[in-house]
DNA sequence: CTACTTGCAAATGCTTTGCAGGAGA
DNA sequence: TCTCCTGCAAAGCATTTGCAAGTAG
């Protein structure tokens, strides 16, 4: 799609990996490309499918390294298995819809004014318990369109 | 503390277990009592400590049964391990502070007006993607008081 | 008596790690 | 060449399950 944006992304990833003495190899490119491609938090299965020929263990290791480099974030889905997405400073701040039927995760982006309100409220509540907030996440639990369709 | 409230809680749990043909046995009472006692989402380790003599496998089974009965809810903590708490219709709707230092989870309760605003916004965003919302959760990630203290 | 419970040990399945050969700079 | 990367196989570890004895009603 947007070739220049992709180029920038890969350059950014490369720079961040270098910071932690890591190289941006073909395997890692494949993982990053898959995360861009799928455009929603990916399970290990998703990545295995999109990165054929890449060993599972390597996938896990790449994800760990990319997390260290600040490129990838791991999120905990309702089913307990790991999901991975590009970090928010690369994409944009957003939240998730979690389907309790199939475990799928979709993205949502609230309005800036809503986010501001949310952040302020949460900051206040956290401070009141001696907690230093670094960020937040909001998940909506429910049933996705395809599960609702196949149910009935 | 509140004896009558505790009595009511146990009666409620018993009724809900009966609905799914389960008995409210000593082991299950111990798990429920531990969840009340600790007053924050409990790890399996927490429960093992508070329920000495109860086998791990039984703890897991009790938690599964209590979830089926609608008494307990499992939440996914940042560290990937399971945490368990009483369901919200027994306690009250609330959200969580997750310490990225030690994995601890604390509760926070936003104001009703904030909750209303939040719920409405999320409902709108979810519907826009063909998603039927059933509930939501908000987590604040950061550093708890004791981790901040021991760090420096 | 009949059905649900529970401890113990074995099994599962996602995730991590040791090791040795490969590849980038 | 020195260091980092990666596949394969083995290990780890939280969680689940088979089984047989225990217990509630």
Image (cartoon, coloured by chain):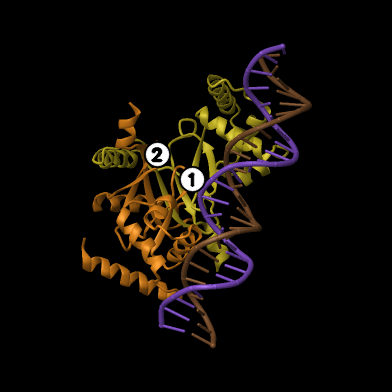
Chain colours: A yellow, B orange, C brown, D purple
| Residue toward you, D4 or A99 | D4
Q: Which residue shows up at 58% across the image and 35% down it?
A: A63
Q: Which residue shows up at 50% across the image and 29% down it?
A: A70
In the picture, which quadrant includes the C terminus of chain B? top left
Residue B129 makes an appearance in the image: no
Side (left or right) of B108 relative to B42: left
Q: Which residue shows up at 63% across the image and 46% down it?
A: A45
| Residue toward you, A54 or C2 | C2
Q: Which residue shows up at 22% across the image and 66% down it?
A: B3
Q: Secondary structure at mark 2?
A: loop
Q: CA distance from mark 1 to mark 2?
A: 12 Å
- Same chain for the residues at labels 1 and 2, yes or no? yes
Q: Looking at the image, is mark 1 or mark 2 earlier in the sequence?
A: 1
Quadrant of residue A127 within the rendered picture: top left
Quadrant of residue B139 within the rendered picture: top left
Mark 1 — residue? B80
Mark 2 — on which chain does it sit? B
């Amino acid at each position: 799609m947007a070739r220049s944006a992709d180029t920038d992304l890969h350059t950014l990833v490369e720079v961040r990996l270098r910071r932690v003495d890591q190289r941006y190899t073909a395997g890692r490119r494949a993982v990053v490309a898959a995360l861009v491609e799928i455009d929603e938090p990916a399970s290990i299965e998703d990545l295995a499918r999109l990165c054929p020929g890449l060993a599972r263990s390597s996938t896990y290791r790449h994800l760990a390294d990319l997390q260290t480099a600040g490129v990838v974030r791991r999120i905990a889905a309702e089913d307990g298995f790991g999901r991975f997405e590009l970090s928010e400073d690369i994409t944009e701040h957003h939240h998730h819809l979690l389907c309790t039927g199939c475990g799928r995760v979709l993205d949502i982006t609230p309005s800036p004014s809503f986010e501001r309100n949310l952040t302020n409220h949460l900051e206040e509540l956290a401070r009141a318990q001696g907690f230093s907030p670094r960020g937040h996440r909001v998940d909506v639990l429910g049933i996705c369109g395809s599960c609702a369709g196949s149910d009935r």
